[in-house]
Image: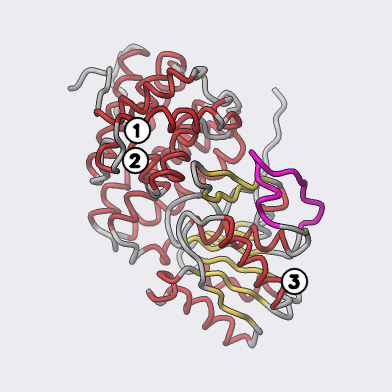
Amino acid sequence: MAFPFISPIRIEAGENALERVPSLLEKYSAEKILVFADPGVVSAGIASKLTDLLDREGYDYYLYDALEPEPPVAVGDAAADAVRSEKADLVIGIGGGSSLDIAKAAAVMQGNEGSLANYLNLSGNRAFHSKGVPKILIPTTAGTGAEITDIAVFSLEQTKDVLTHEYLLADAAIIDPALTYTVPPKVTAATGVDALTHAVEALISVNATPLTDALAMEAIRRISGSLRTAVAEGENKKARDDMAWGSMIAGLSFYNAGVSGVHALAYPLGGMFKVPHGEANAVLLPYIFDFIWPHALPKMKMMADALGVLEIEASDEEAAKAAVRELRDIVKDVEIPPTLKEFGVKENDLDKLAEAALGQKRLLARSPKEYSLEDIRGRYEAALNGTLNITSK
């Protein structure tokens, strides 16, 4: 079996890995650095941990914080204009997934003309011809995996769309769990379930390989074993370390194997109802796997093992159902709303949500179970009403 595997050029990981930024910068001979950080990261004093390093080493930089979660294209275009106007020759992104997505998009647009809209996967009509300027990505949540992938997500009126090209890959990713110690419980929960979703969707993807499976299984073990603790005890270093590693490993897995139904249905929730991405994934997660488990039984049994719910002599079906129950319980235990009703979705919204999700063909094609329009609407309806076919224990 031959398969490719792609990752950033360099990964620096471990507590206080941020301190390695100056040594990384030496190889780029950068004269002007543009640092992207969202306002929350700035106000929490996390961005200053980076800028203090840059000050100490005498680097010329500009801190840009006009960012927002679930960013529209206009925010990305403004960030790209800042890279051009500042004549930056290196970009650093520090923050959550949206900040990192903006940073890598803006870095690439330094070498390409037009708007980000011209390069979107679903509606764009241009292809990138230049890599732009080098970029270093530093996540402060665990996480989106944005530091590992070549995907940048932007919100449209009805859904979300992405830039995706190898040029968006980081030149270096820095995974420092110490940056996540002060992340609030609600954000820890949402980003943690996002990372878990990356791992479980990569595991069952039709594009999975033995290498992505190994990474996905390790990510599931770490995240499912530590997420509840990380939410309840934010300064628990062991839990935070497992979450940081798990998120990064999940990112490597899903970047190569791909995600599918959960993300496909989550994008319209973000576009139409402004549901944060991690929460959109979380509320859909058990309902999607309740639908597809009969079509991925061997992988679902592997998942049950990694989740720690595989019983001795359990059949494939019993193991699969146990895995789905555990996904449901994790979402419940970290206190993410379990139904779409709690995000303001109503019955008469389901048709437009389903139509928008059906357009996410790039994602749906990776599912082991094909989706019709009726199937998608049925999943939204199940998530609206909290209906699962698996029996409770």
Give the main secondary structure, helix, strand or loop, of the magenta stretch: loop
- Does dot 1 land on a helix, a strand or a loop? helix
**What is the spatial separation of the Cα atoms under label 2 and label 1, in whole angstroms?**
6 Å
Q: Secondary structure at mark 3?
A: loop
Where does the magenta region start and end?
Answer: 115-131
- Counting residues from the start of the chain, the first of labels 2 and 1 encountered is 2
Image: 380 above or below 241: above
In the picture, measured across the screen, residue 350 lies left or right of residue 260, that is left
Q: Quadrant of residue 147?
A: bottom right
The residue drawn where x is 61% and y is 47% is: 151
Residue furthest to the left: 393
Apparent side of residue 62 relative to residue 109 in the rendered image (left or right): left
Amino acid residing under circle 1: Leu
Residue bearing the label numbered 1 = 307
Quarter of the image for the N terminus: give it: top right
Disc 2 and disc 3 in contact, CB within 8 angstroms: no
Q: Residues within 10 Å of mark 1 (few under 14, many from 20)?
A: many
In the orientation shown, which residue stands out farthest toward the front?
Answer: 348
Q: Name the quadrant of the C terminus.
A: top left
Q: Tag 2's secondary structure?
A: helix
Tag 2 residue: 224
Label 1 vs 3, first from the N-terminus: 3
Please name the amino acid that badge 3 sits on. Tyr
* Res. 104 image quadrant: bottom right
